[in-house]
Image (cartoon, rainbow, N blue to C red):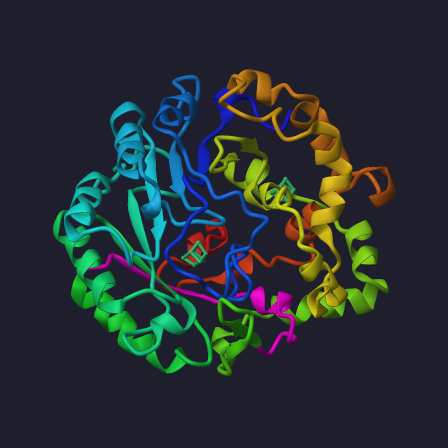
């Protein structure tokens, strides 16, 4: 069984798929331009909070509020959801945000809620609450990637959060345009009272329509405004970007590697984690949830699609066309009913050792195959090296 309710230790929550920003390598938009029309923009209702954080989740230790298509700060009931977790469970909370929204009072309230430490109570890797501020540069560079954000507002909000007692981390994705600011940002983080500063080495240039050395940034009308590039300094580059091309060469094709890859499930085996999306639907992980969003005809024809196989379509054909997309709704079913659905009961796990023609999912092979780790390779954190492989990907 993928999970039993009383063995789940982590929930990854997408409260909303709406966002104030337009990061060029985020799946919610076309390279920083318009929001993808295939996304059904939606978010949790207040009643979803009690539906999702059920007392039956008796082993729950950590809740990550981190949307694959949205920023939890935007959701109407985000403070209520965090407060519910903090008052009704013993779980720690991680809250990922670009932080360029809401008022500083709102951030003070969040900081007050995210201020506790576990105190060595158990072996779980997360020992305290954490507000994660995704800030990829300083005043003159952050909005090159975090488009439509305001650096001064972010600094005000982070200051309010930290002053209220919130435990904060600054996450910094390194590009060519901000690599010279890493040490300055680290010093600023320390001065402001961030408890951690983490560099992230993105593997997402792998999916760029212009190839792995350049990412286009489009206007909302679809015209090219400028490009972003991976860092040139070796210490900030993600080796996995080249590795996938090498694997395609070694195995003859991407499918050749997917067929051969031995799968070790990040969510189930490493984190004991499960994902709930902005419609309160349960998925094994954020990657398979992502595959419910149809590819636009435009994307399917793009240069990226020629380099990277259409994994989304593979999942849709093998899974969602059979299961439909209501079997996993906590608005219609209980946790127990969803976890006992045949796909989560047994079919998903069996697929990991099947062949591509008998059900193995290309998504599972690409994300959790043994020779390629686009997710785990993104963390780069000297201070917390022992946790490097424990982190997950959030936008
Ligand atoms: S990566 Fe995060 S902040 Fe950026 S557009 Fe996507 S959801 Fe918004
Ligand atoms: S992609 Fe497949 S193997 Fe990887 S975390 Fe998701 S369910 Fe597990």
Q: In the visual, does 240 lie left or right of 147?
A: right
Q: Is residue 173 visible?
A: no
Q: For residue 153: magenta?
A: no
Q: Residue at x 82, y 38 (%)?
A: 354
For image coordinates 43% across by 22% down, the residue present is 57
Query: Residue 105 in the image: x percent, y percent?
Result: 14, 48
Q: Is residue 392 left or right of residue 324?
A: left
Camera-nearest residue between 131 and 305 = 305
Where residue 12 appears, as percent x and y from the top left, is 46, 39
Residue bounds of the magenta highlight: 193-214
> Is residue 209 rendered magenta in the image?
yes
Residue 313 in the image, given as x and y percentages of width and height: 74, 47
In the displayed structure image, the side of residue 231 where residue 166 appears, left or right: left
Residue 149 in percent (x, y) is at 32, 64
Residue placed at 82% from the left, 50% from the top?
Answer: 259
Kindly indicate the quadrant of the structure image that contains residue 170.
bottom left
Residue sitting nearer the eye, 15 or 187: 15
Residue 180 drawn above or below residue 372: below
Which residue is pictured at 46% across the width and 56% down the height?
A: 395
248, above or below 52, in the image = below
- For the question of whether residue 372 can be seen, the reply is yes
Quadrant that contains the N terminus: top right
Along the line of sight, which residue is nearer the eye, 53 or 198?
A: 53
Q: Is residue 111 above or below residue 344?
A: below
Taking 287 as reference, is 276 left or right?
left
Asked where in the image residue 178 lies, by quadrant, the reply is bottom left
Q: Quadrant of ligand 2?
A: top right
Q: Height in image: 23 above or below 338?
A: below
């Amino acid at each position: 069984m993928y999970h039993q309710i009383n063995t789940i230790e982590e929930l990854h929550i997408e409260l909303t798929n709406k966002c104030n920003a337009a990061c060029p390598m985020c799946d919610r938009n076309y390279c920083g331009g318009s929001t993808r029309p295939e996304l059904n923009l939606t978010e949790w209702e207040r009643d979803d909070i009690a539906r999702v954080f059920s007392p039956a989740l008796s082993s729950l230790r950590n809740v990550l509020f981190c949307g694959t298509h949205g920023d939890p700060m935007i959701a109407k009931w985000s403070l209520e959801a965090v407060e519910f977790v903090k008052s009704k469970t013993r779980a720690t909370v991680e809250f990922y945000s670009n932080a360029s929204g809401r008022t500083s009072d709102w951030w003070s309230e969040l900081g007050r809620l995210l201020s506790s430490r576990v105190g060595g109570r158990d072996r779980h890797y997360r020992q305290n609450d954490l507000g994660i501020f995704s800030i990829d540069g300083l005043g003159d560079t952050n909005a090159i990637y975090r488009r439509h954000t305001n650096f001064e507002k972010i600094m005000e909000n982070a200051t309010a959060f930290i002053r209220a007692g919130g435990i904060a981390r600054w996450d910094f994705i390194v590009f060519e345009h901000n690599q010279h600011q890493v040490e300055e940002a680290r010093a600023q983080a320390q001065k402001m009272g961030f408890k951690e500063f983490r560099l992230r080495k993105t593997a997402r240039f792998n999916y760029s329509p212009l190839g792995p050395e350049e990412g286009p940034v489009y206007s909302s009308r679809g015209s090219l405004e400028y490009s972003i590039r991976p860092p040139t300094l070796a210490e900030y580059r993600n080796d996995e970007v080249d590795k996938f091309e090498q694997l395609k060469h070694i195995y003859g094709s991407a499918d050749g590697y997917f067929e051969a890859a031995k799968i070790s499930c990040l969510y189930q085996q490493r984190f004991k984690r499960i994902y709930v999306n902005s419609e309160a639907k349960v998925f094994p992980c954020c990657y398979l949830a992502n595959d419910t969003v149809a590819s636009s005809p435009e994307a399917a024809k793009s240069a990226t699609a020629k380099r990277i196989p259409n994994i989304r379509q593979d999942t849709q054909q093998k899974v969602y066309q059979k299961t439909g997309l209501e079997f996993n709704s906590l608005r219609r079913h209980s946790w127990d009913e969803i976890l006992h659905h045949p796909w989560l009961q047994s079919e998903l796990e069996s697929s990991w050792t099947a062949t591509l023609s008998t059900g193995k999912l290309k998504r599972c092979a690409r994300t959790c195959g043994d020779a390629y780790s686009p997710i785990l390779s993104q963390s780069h954190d000297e201070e917390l090296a022992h946790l490097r492989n424990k982190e997950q990907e959030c936008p």
